[in-house]
Image (spheres, rainbow, N blue to C red):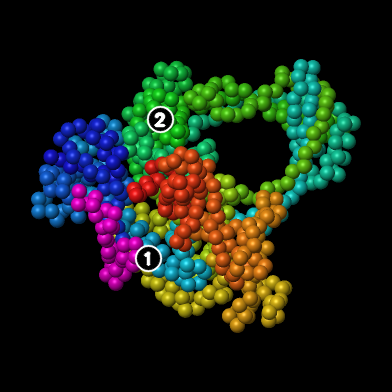
Amino acid sequence: MKLVIVESPTKAKTLQRILGEGYDFKASMGHIRDLPKSGLGVDVKHDFEPEYIVPDKSQKVLKDIKKSASKASTVFLATDPDREGEAIAWHLELLLSHLKHKPEFKRVAFHELTKDAVEEAFEHPEHVKKHLVDAQQARRVLDRLVGYKLSPLLWKTVRFGLSAGRVQSVAVRLIVEREREREAFKPAEYWEIKGEFASPHEKFVADLVKKNGRDLKINDEKRAKEIESELKRDEFQITEIEKSERVKNPYPPLRTSTLQQGASNVFGFTAKRTMQIAQHLFEKGYITYHRTDSLSLASKFIGMARDYVGKEFGSKYLPKDGIQYKTTSKNAQEAHEAIRPTHASRTPNESGLKGDEKKIYSLIWKRAIESQLLPAIYDQTTVLVESKKEKYLFRAVGSVIKFEGWLVVGNGNGENLVQLPNLKEGETLDLNKIDSSQHFTQPPARYSDATLIKKLEEMGIGRPSTYAPTISTIQGRGYVIRDQKYFVPTDFAYVVTDLLVDNFANIVDYDFTAKMEDKLDDIALGELSWVPVIREFYKPFEKNLEEKSKKLNKRDIITLEKTKEKCPECGSPMVVKLGRYGKFLSCSNYPKCDYAEPTDENKVLDKKGNEIEDFGKCPNCENGHFILKQGRFGRFLACSNYPKCKTTKPFLEKIDISCPKCKEGDIIIKKAKGRAFFGCSKYPDCDWSSWKDPRNFPEVLKPENWKKPKKK
């Protein structure tokens, strides 16, 4: 009997369908061995040797795998084809090599779960690639050293529960710096003027762009009205008509980062949600491996895509040869191909997929097929209209599709093309209407999942497997909140970023972090040993950490600004401090005087900045009122006199999902035993509840993540 070990039951089922009888299949359920959750787990005195353990949740899984391995002649380690998958295979081999019956171990890796790819991998098995394991191990150890050593300093000086990380802290810094750019931005007024002209044939609209050959800038309404008056008294003539061809090339196939960006832009999906769906699609055999920096496509797929396009749309849309795209990422080492469908002819509508899986598959399929078609060609016409007296110049641009090219796959790309009427040079035009509109320059946009991933990738920070967990971490730790799909830094993000920039510059330095990623890639290539890389980083980091731990003072760090207000109890100046639940006013004479009061920022405001009605009087103090606050486990009601009065009560927040047990009640967020949890609004008639962490909302509300109620 031959044993095949993979990470998930879904992947095991797909392989079982392909390989048939003669094999036993087991799922490791991810990493079977890891660093301990408590304790450093790294022996810094002995070459940073990791102290791996088998977690409690994996003990039963390992026992089951050992039982099957003891009867197997060969154990095939069929984990994912990247560094994480290689590390899982390595750990499994080490744990199973101590069995009395020693099976033969073989490593099989495939980038798609198709019959040909799987059979090819099993016919030509390999051994675990230790250099890939070393790269994964180096990243794991490095991140543990930074997080475990630096996080306690944040607990001591800012707030318990915060964390620092090599990539996550850089991501937070980017978001903070972008927000500061927005705060410092001063909008400038400008005006646009459009003219509606009439020819003997049709009307068309043109933009005012120049006067006397110079670009025209209109900064106020007065100037706009002056120009309007001059234009109304003028005459107009077409001075030039330029016709040209515009070529629009197809986009390359998707890789990890562009898949996450596309899903965010088109469907509003988070990076985590996108990667979970892509994982399911890979394990079911619909797509190739989804963690990749590569843009190349297998020649076999290119042939399948060309056959499909030729039959479906015609050979006129195909170039002479298949198209290969040059990989632009400087470290494309995780996989051999871009993300593509395993079968070109399996269209989204014929795939049998539904919901989110169909949406993500459609993105992948469409981009892969379109990448093999000819460019789209447009006939573009540019018309220049000049006023005879004042020499104002208007420009109008129109386009029509001459050849659809790759656009035929998606029935166009959603462009609203402007088609101009049939005009002639020298033709005199009537000015029917003038439209002046006021505008203001806009601050740089906040980061979304898509733009943050794009920025990190451009800077060489992080890799395909790190983007989604990084974004999840900075949200879970309370550094950022979402405003629709955009990230807004919390007060803690500002404080921690400034603390790290001032005292641990290399941890959040963009170039340093990118160079460290390059070194990890060199380890994966076998060009560097991982221990010297960690040692080079750790020694100065440890020395600096010891020095800063002695000097840094919590009172100074959490004091954000001074105010002109005086303490009503002792007369000392009041300062703004950052507490566990946000900013508050405190006496600068603390701890001798412990007077404090909430700032205006702690009041609940609506989108227009108006104060929302309070949630009732606090029963434990005279002037306090309950207000809504955001805590680490969700929203709750707290006394407005915090921290003088620490009275709280749960905020019963209704969620638009029915109870999975009684089907009648609504799920609401409750609080008990100091923790928030999900419960049914029909309690006690219905006792359904889930103690999954509400910080993971809305993922915990998916049916597969519901905790079944205990039987009475």
Tell me the mark number nearer the camera, choosing from 2 and 1.
2
Could you say which disc has been placed on residue 353 in the image? Answer: 2
* Residue 470 placement, left or right of 71: right
Instruction: Please tell me which residue is depicted at 20% across the width and 48% down the height of the picture.
Output: 65
Q: Toward which corner of the image does residue 47 lie, by quadrant? A: bottom left
- Calculate the distance from the C-alpha at mark 2 to the C-alpha at mark 1: 43 Å
Instruction: Please tell me which residue is depicted at 32% across the width and 52% down the height of the picture.
Output: 524
Location of mark 1 (residue): 145
Give the amino acid at mark 2.
Answer: Leu
Instruction: Please tell me which residue is depicted at 71% across the width and 20% down the height of the picture.
Output: 421
Visible residue check, residue 625 = yes
Residue 303 coordinates in the image, percent (x, y): 35, 25
* Residue 205 placement, left or right of 522: right
The kind of secondary structure element at disc 2 is loop
Q: How many marks?
A: 2
Was residue 706 drawn as part of the magenta stretch in this picture? no
**Earlier-in-chain disc, 2 versus 1:** 1
Which stretch did the figure color magenta? Answer: 36-64
Q: Is 362 above or below relative to 693?
A: above
Dividing the image into 4 quarters, which one contains the N terminus?
A: top left
Was residue 53 drawn as part of the magenta stretch in this picture? yes
* Foreground pick, 260 / 14: 14
Q: Toward which corner of the image does residue 287 lie, by quadrant? A: top left
Residue 316 coordinates in the image, percent (x, y): 46, 18
* Foreground pick, 146 / 219: 146
